[in-house]
Amino acid sequence: MASRRMSRDSNVVRPFPFFRAGVRTDPSGAKRPVLVFEDVFKYFRPDVPTLRSVSLSVERGEFLFITGPSGSGKSTLLQLIYRQHTVDEGRILFCGRDIARLTADSVPFLRRNLGVVFQDFRVVPHWTVFENVAIALEILSMPHRLIRSRVSEALERVGLSGRGDDRTSCLSGGEQQRVAVARAIVAEPALILADEPTGNLDPHLALDVLTLFEEINLTGTTVLFATHDHSLISKRDHRLVSLEDGRLIESSEGLGGWHTRMRGVAV
Amino acid sequence: MDLKTAISRAKRGLREDLRLYLVAISSLTVAFLCLGATLLSVVNLSELASQWGRSRRMTVYLVDGARPRDVLQLRTLLEELPEVRSAEHVSASQARAQFLEQADLAGELGELPPDVFPSSVEVTLTGDVPIQRVTEIAQRLQRFGTVDEVETYGGWFGKLENLLTAGQSISALLAVLVLVCVLAVVGNTIRLAVAGRRQEIEVMKLCGATDSFVRRPFVVEGAFQGFMAALASLVLLLVGFLIVKGQLDSTVTVVTGLHAVFLSPLVIAAMLVGGCLAGAAGSALSLRRYLTV
């Protein structure tokens, strides 16, 4: 399943995503990083910044782990991207556009270019699997016939083919998370934000979900995967950044270097 | 978001909160029923007033044994008046036959002799005769020896007009009260529905739904509530009207000369459209206040 998508998408340059329909795409945008944090500060308390001088650049098609202890600001970092909060200082550029300067009316159009997956799944329990996934396309006023085919495709990708009529409340935790992933990918966003998506899953399921995200990444979608689960991170060789005391630290030595820093030994 | 999608989402919402909406619609139906009943009364009073006004008339009761020559002279005098359109003599036997026909009581009162009913001259006036002129004509007629009594129906018509005016005022007041009811009930129902669907709304917003995408189905649901309440009240009112009419129509006709009518199609349409719009407005107001998106 993933290999078929790979061969179809591997040579496709993902188009420059636009925030409003009708805006002309800029071909040069395909060469720019998809996400850039420039010296970002975020305060929830006046004296203690949650994020402190965070600078980060994410290229198209990257898979990035974001790690750090609980309360380090991982979720806040992702929330700034989908404009749950706004930055207090600095800029966040998504496809070259400053997210902080978007008006409230434009935020929905930003979110249509993102897929977000949460630790608590955030699926509607009394809806069917189909309805939970289709909502992302109904919002785009897509014709129902097209919605049906896209949803079927998305469910197939996450391994829930034929489960469209099942009520989500009847699914296991892992399956509900797959529904959430399907909803995140069905609109083919430029960027997927995963905020501790495996936090409520057992290690076996967690690995399954991680593998799912990696398969999605192989098709060209950029993935930011926030987790404090080092057992997951250690199994993969993706780019890793960590948040410590509100500061973002790039770890070129992978998780090993991160552990070394945590123990206070100079690298 | 197109209307079709909004309606489809509203249908889903109605299914999910069916009990809540049934309670709301029941409450609103009572309010609309009160309004409908008042309007029905006003419509029939208005019809009666119109009928009495169109057939502005006098009844000149004749003494027993009035000579045909005197009756003819009286008729000729009346028809010469510019205010009089026609003056018809109704003999005692004719009056008896008319009464039995209207009252549909031929079986019970068929044995009554004709001389129980007085003979009369039924005078039809033109439509715009002032009441003072009618009274003046009646007073002149009283001087005739052939005339026993003149009935101008002025008192009845005055009372009817007062009743009609009061009925119209009450209808207007009730309409305002019903509007307030609809806004309040629908508003609170939608507020409860929004509270119950917080999770859905949150998911929709995360997927990039605009404010109107979230709000529009709720407005459709509010409009549906108002429409259904108005429709239910009209159906109940019609059933009640048909039952009452079947039992009392003959008596009403004898007393007033009127066959009761139901609300006109225009009034029915106005209630349905008004209910729909009021429901939508109630929902929109509630969303503005309680739905933070």
Image: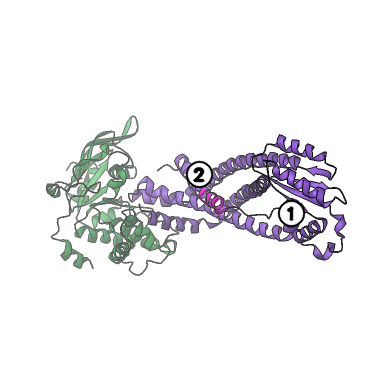
Chain colours: A green, B purple
Determine crowd level at label 1: few under 14, some 14-19, many 20+ residues with C-alpha closer than 10 A: some
The one of A153 and A231 positioned closer to us in this rendering: A153
Q: CA distance from mark 2 to mark 1?
A: 41 Å
Give the labeled residue for mark 2. Answer: B282
Q: Are marks 2 and 1 in contact (CB under 8 Å)?
A: no
In the image, A46 versus B167, the foreground residue is B167
The answer to which of marks 2 and 1 sits earlier in the sequence is 1
From the image, state whether disc 2 or disc 1 is nearer to you: 1
Between residues B65 and B258, which one lies in front from this camera angle? Answer: B65
Which secondary structure lies at badge 1?
helix
List the residue tagged with mark 1: B252
Query: Which chain letter goes with mark 1?
Result: B
Residue A33: say if magenta: no
Front residue of A161 and A29: A29
Stretch in magenta: B254-273
Q: Is residue A21 above or below residue A104?
A: below
The quadrant of the picture occupied by the N terminus of chain A is bottom left
Residue displayed at 21% across by 55% down = A221
User: What is the three-letter code of the residue carrying label 2?
Assistant: Gly
Q: Amino acid at mark 1?
A: Val
Q: In terms of secondary structure, where does tag 2 sit? A: helix
- The quadrant of the image that shows the C terminus of chain A is top left
Secondary structure that dominates the magenta span: helix
Q: Residue farthest to the bottom?
A: A162
